[in-house]
Amino acid sequence: MSNLPKHDYIFVDESGDAGYALDPATGELLSSSYYTLASLHICDDCFRDINRHVASFRYYTAMNSNLKLPPEKDVFRRLLEPISELAASGKNIWASVVHVDKQNYTGSYLKPGGTRSPDPTRFRNRMLRCLLEHHFSSYPLRSQHYDLVIDRIEMTKAEVDNLHAYLAGNYNVPTPTHITHAASIYVEPLQLVHHIAAGFKDVAAGQGLPESLRFVSARDVTTNQVVIFKKCLWARTGLRIIGDPPSP
C-alpha cells in the first residue's frame, strides 16, 4: 500500500491591504506601506501533527479565540517554532511568502496612472499567482489534488470562478481542485498562515527575521512579478492543468 499523501492543501492569508490611497493634502500613504501574502502547504498525512500542536498551544495559553499574536512576543515563537521544527524534520509541511513595498511597486493594479487601473481584487490575484509560482518552484505537489483555502470570506462566487480560471491558464501553477474561502476562526492552519504573513510584513519593513520563520521561503516581488523558474509543473507532479502539452 502506498504511503504517499492523497491530498495537498495550501492555506493563504495576507497582511496589509490591497489598496493604495494617498492623502491629497500631504501625499502621505494612507493604506499599508507593505503587502505580504503567505502560504502554508500541508499534506493530509500531517493534519494530525498540526491540530495536535495548535490544540496544545490553546490549552496551555488559554487562548480560545481568533489568534492575533505580535511577532515580537515570545508567544508568537511558541506558536510557530514547532511548525518550523515539523517542517525541518521532513514532514510534508512547507511555507512561502511574497511581499511588496508599495511605494516602489512597479506592477499592475495598485497605483493610478499605470497601464492597468487600480483594482484590489486583481492586485490580490496577481500577488497570489506570484506566491504560487514561487512556492511551486521549490515545493511541488505530493498528490494529484490540492485545495486552495483562502482567508477571504467576502469573495463572491464570481470572484472565486475568475480566480480559478486565472490560475488555470498559468503553466507554472497547477490548477486547484477546489478553491475555498473560509474564516480563520474555525480553520487552524489559517490561524498559522496569518502569523507567517504578519511576521514577514515586519521583515519587509526592515526588521529582523524571527527564528521561528526561518523555514519560510520568501521573495520580494516589489519590482519583478515574473518568476524566472519556467519548468512545466505537469511534468514534475503528474497533475494535468488546462493548456498542458499532450502526454509524450
Image: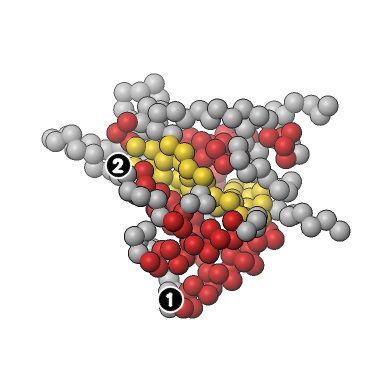
Q: Is residue 121 visible to the viewer in this orientation of the structure?
A: no
Of residue 135 and residue 159, the one placed in the foreground of this image is 135
Name which residue type carries label 1: Thr
Query: From the viewer's perspective, is the residue at label 1 or at label 2 nearer?
Result: 1
How would you rate the neighbour count of disc 1 (Cα within 10 Å): few for under 14, some for 14-19, many for 20 or more? few
Q: Are marks 1 and 2 in contact (CB under 8 Å)?
A: no
Residue located at (59% from left, 61% from top): 86
Secondary structure category for the residue under label 1:
helix
Q: Earlier in the sequence, mark 1 or mark 2?
A: 2
Label 1 sits on residue:
61
Number of residues whose C-alpha sits closer than 10 Å to that of mark 2, classed few (under 14), some (14–19) or many (20 or more): some
Q: Quadrant of the C terminus?
A: top right
List x then y, in percent, for residue 123.
43, 36
Q: How is the image coloured?
A: secondary structure
Q: Residue at x 48, y 48 (%)?
A: 38
- SS under mark 2: loop
Along the horizontal axis of the image, is 50 left or right of 59?
right
Residue 21 at x, y = what percent? 27, 38
Q: Which residue is mark 2?
A: 33
